[in-house]
Each structure stands twice: as structure tokens, then as C-alpha cells.
Amino acid sequence: MGFQKTLSLCFFLSIAFQSLFSAPLIEQFKHAGYAEFCDKRQGAAAFNSLYAQFDELIAFLQSNPVWAQKLQSVKERFIRSKARNYYSTDFFGFYDESKREGRRQISFYYSIHFHEFIDSYYPEFSQVPEIVRFLEACRTIQQPYGDVFEEAAAELGVETIFASKYGSPPLLFKVVKYLSSYIATKPHYDGSAFSLFLDSTDSQSLLLAPYQSSFTVEDFASPPREFSRQEDQNSILLIPGALLTDFFIYPTPHIVLQSEKSRYAAVAFAMRPNYTPQKCEFSSLPRFDID
């Protein structure tokens, strides 16, 4: 049943992408910085459940620092393994920056290989329901989006970027909680091939701009959404990251503005297997004044 559901979702996203690309994807990136499509299989209900499980994980790890340290040790061992090279990054696991000035956020970077590494080498984690439930929720939600990245790469004619023995794009899934004291003063570029903004409880706080030779604060705006966040559907934004410059595709800078309330978001990143990023000077980004 789960397999059939995944096939159904993948099929739906594929059809959505075909209709979306009536305008060439490269032109959408150049003129708007993003492409939007509608996900009618994983809406607000699925992501709200994920965020609730994330809160349970946060509460458990903050009240049980021994387990938080164990999870950190797992990450350190994983990034020394060969599986890490498939993702070409060291971002995995739990990051508690709730007390770090200028950050004030808590995030988790999930990948299927990191999950399997925990299951294979650390069976004691299976005794912690907060960890088990959260990892399984991440596995379920992130599963179909590799097909989306493959569709995007095919549309752009860069299918070779995902070539590996695994036969699918390396997908890194991020769940983040922005605290009410979170502050961001400068946009950034993602160190990915593509990024998919899957969900946010405050989508208007995301500002972005198409890549250009120079930027001002006024260039950044919240994308007008054709689709809304509902219980059974969602608006998804696809942007290029910084790992496509060898194809003359440049990244979309973006920023999440501060708010007086806690917020959640989920993002999927398509990485490049066994890849060493080129040294590239991107356009400098403006600083946002904080009142």
C-alpha cells in the first residue's frame, strides 16, 4: 500500500512538472528565480504532523543531553564513511542553535543513508520512540522528491549531475524551527544543485530574487503564490543552488525574515554525488537593516 501511494505521488508530481514547464525552466529561473507547482498529495496536515514530531524530538534531546551527544557522535562517524561522499556535504543530523545569537533556530538534516547508518550501527536508537517516529516521518515525506529533481535536471539538459551507483539524486531533507528571536540580516545562496521549498507555516517570510550582477534590498520579494497551503495540498518552489555554475546556471539568493512567532519549514536539497564545488565568486548580497 505504501509503495502504491509513493508511485501515485511520484506520478502526480511528474504530471505537474510537465504542465509547469510550458515555459522553459531556465527562463523561469532567469526571470523569476524560481518555479512553482502544486503538490496535492502532501499538504499542511502531513507537514504539521512532522513539525509536531520534531517538537517531540527537540524536547527529548534538550532534556536528555546524553542522547544528543550520541546523535552528534553518529554524525561525526557518518561523515567519515564513504556514504557521505554521495552527498558531498557534512550537514547531517541535529543542530540546536536556539541559544546562538544571530541564529536562534533548531534544524535536522535527514538523508536515507544517514538513517540506514543509524539503524545498522546504533540499534539502541530504536529504543527511543521520539527518534524513531521523527526519522520515519522524514523518510516518508522526502521519498518522492528525487523524481522532481530528476525532472528538473532533464528539463535543463544536465541529467549527468546525478550519475552514481545509486541511480537517483542524493536528497538531503531539512526540517527547521525558527524561534521568535530568530534574526537574519543577509540573504544566502544554497550549496545545492536544486532546492525545493516544500512547506512553511509562514511562507510570506521567504524573500528571494533572480540572480543578477548586483543586488539591493528592494530586489527581494515574497513570491506570489498561485497555490495555497491547505490540509491536502501545498505550493512548492524550486530554485537553483550554487552547484550548477559549470552549466552557467546561477543560484537564487533568498532570506527568511524575522518574526515575533515561532515558525517551521521543510526543504529538500538535491546534492551532487562525489562532487567538489568550483570556486566561484557570486554577486554580493545586501544587508537587511534590523529595527
Image: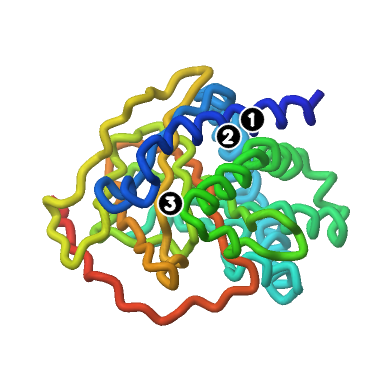
Identify the element where label 2 is drawn: helix
Q: Residue at x 77, y 39 (%)?
A: 129
**Sequence-first disc among 1 and 3:** 1
Q: Residue at x 46, y 28 (%)?
A: 38
Measure the C-alpha gap from mark 1 to mark 3: 35 Å
- Percent position of residue 118, x then y: 79, 57
Residue on which the image places disc 1 = 11
Q: Amino acid at mark 1?
A: Phe
Decide: marks 2, 3 in contact (CB < 8 A)? no
Q: Nearer the viewer, residue 86 or 150?
A: 150
Residue on which the image places disc 2 = 14
Q: Is residue 121 visible?
A: yes
Badge 2 crowding class, 10 Å Cα cut-off, few under 14, some 14 to 19, many 20 or more, is some
Left or right relative to 226: residue 60: right
Position of the N terminus by quadrant: top right
**Closer mark to the observer between disc 1 and disc 3:** 1
- Percent position of residue 7, x then y: 72, 30
- Residue sitting farthest toward the top: 231
Decide: marks 1, 3 in contact (CB < 8 A)? no
Q: Amino acid at mark 2?
A: Ser
Measure the C-alpha gap from mark 2 to mark 1: 5 Å
Q: Residue at x 64, y 33 (%)?
A: 10
Left or right relative to 27: residue 122: right
Q: Which mark is residue 290?
A: none
